[in-house]
Amino acid sequence: MANDIKRVPEFRDEAEERAFWERHDSAGHIDWSKAERVRLPNLKPSTTAISLRLPNALLERIKVAANKRDVPYQSLIKAWLAEKVDTSAL
């Protein structure tokens, strides 16, 4: 297997590397039999802040629902949005 491994090219930037790996299978460039499991406990998913205008009455209803569930209202909104997207998938 070691003889079949191709050299990973040098990349100018992350975009070039991303484009390369989108077109190539890593199995030809990496000997996965030597891979080791790692844990990344401090890795957090990327998030983007957005501004969303809601009627005051709706926001208050959401906050009441979140309070009943003992969760932050923004977390409840994210959960509801994710649930809706998952059930509405094409």
Image (spheres, rainbow, N blue to C red):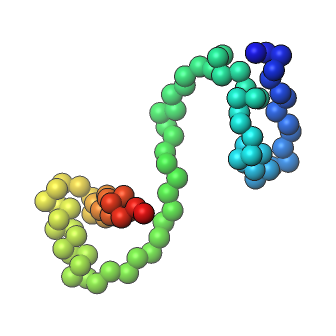
Residue 38 lies, in percent from the top left, at 55, 25
Q: Is residue 67 left or right of residue 44?
A: left
Residue 65 lies, in percent from the top left, at 17, 65
Q: In this view, does 27 lie to the left or right of 10?
A: left
Image quadrant holding the N terminus, namely: top right
Q: Is residue 5 left or right of residue 82?
A: right
Residue 28 lies, in percent from the top left, at 76, 29
Looking at the image, which residue sits at the far left?
68
Image quadrant holding the C terminus, namely: bottom left
- Residue at 33% of width from left, 60% of height from top? 87
- Residue at 36% of width from left, 64% of height from top? 88
Q: In this view, does 49 lie above or below 51?
A: above
Query: How many numbered discs, if any?
Result: 0
Q: Quadrant location of residue 30?
A: top right
| Front residue of this view, candidates 74 and 6 | 6
Q: Can residue 52 be seen in this view?
A: yes
- Residue at 85% of width from left, 48% of height from top? 12
- Residue at 75% of width from left, 40% of height from top? 24
| Front residue of this view, candidates 46 and 32 | 32
Q: Quadrant location of residue 26?
A: top right
| Front residue of this view, candidates 78 and 60 | 78
Looking at the image, which residue sits at the far front?
90
Residue 70 lies, in percent from the top left, at 18, 54
Q: Is residue 17 visible?
A: no
